[in-house]
Structures are given as C-alpha cells and as structure tokens.
Amino acid sequence: MTVGGANGGGSGTFLTGTTCTSSGTFAAENKYMRLVIALAAGEAFPPFTDGKKVYWTALTTAMAASKTADGGFTSVKVEAGAV
C-alpha cells in the first residue's frame, strides 16, 4: 500500500480514535477486506467494520488511481466460499 496523502491527507498511519489532522483518503484492512474512507480534519478515525481498533494509512494519488485487471480496485480479498 502506498502511503502519502491524497487530497492533503498527510502521511503515515493513524490508530482508531486519534484525530485526523488533515483531510484525505485513508485505508485499513484485515485478512478479508480493505476499507477506504474519506475523512475531514478534526474527525476521529473510526474502528474497523468489526468494531476493532485498526491502523488507518493515508493514501497517495497513485494508490487511489491504481487499477486491477477488472478496471477498479478489488474489494474482496478472498475467493468466494473460502471463508
């Protein structure tokens, strides 16, 4: 995953509950999926969809624009029936 700061989001990783210092696009993932969110400065980084704390990574324009073979990003990281 490429870190940086698309839309001025800064760089690095941020733990759930910390305050976003610069608006941008951020991603977090577990072994099943990657979640991408837009967050404004002053908002708190949320927990993952399972309610657990997670580190959010600032995305660069390159990451946000990257494509997969299907023409977009693949939201499911496991084959159907594998879970």
Image (cartoon, helix red, strand yellow):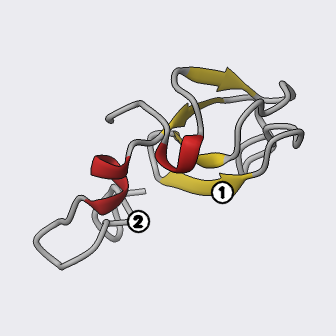
Three-letter residue code for mark 1: Ala
Mark 2 Cα-neighbour bin, 10 Å: few <14, some 14–19, many ≥20: few
Distance between mark 2 and mark 1 Cα atoms: 16 Å
Q: Is residue 26 visible?
A: no
Residue lying at the far front in this picture: please name it: 8
- Residue 76 is situated, as x and y percent measured from the top left of the image, at 39, 64
Q: Is residue 79 left or right of residue 55?
A: left
Q: Position of residue 19 (x, y in %)?
A: 85, 29
- Against 64, residue 31 (above or below) is above
Instruction: Tell me the element at label 1.
Output: strand
Most foreground residue, 9 or 52: 9
Residue closest to the far bottom: 71
State the quadrant of the C terminus. Answer: bottom left
Query: Seen in the image, is 42 located left or right of residue 35?
Result: right
Q: Which residue is mark 1?
A: 38
Sooner in the amino-acid sequence: mark 2 or mark 1: 1
Q: Quadrant of residue 65?
A: bottom left
Residue 59 in sight here: yes
Type of amino acid at the residue the image marks with label 2: Ser
Q: Secondary structure at mark 2?
A: loop
Query: Which label is found at residue 75?
Result: 2
Point 41% across, 65% down: residue: 75
Q: Quadrant of the N terminus?
A: top left
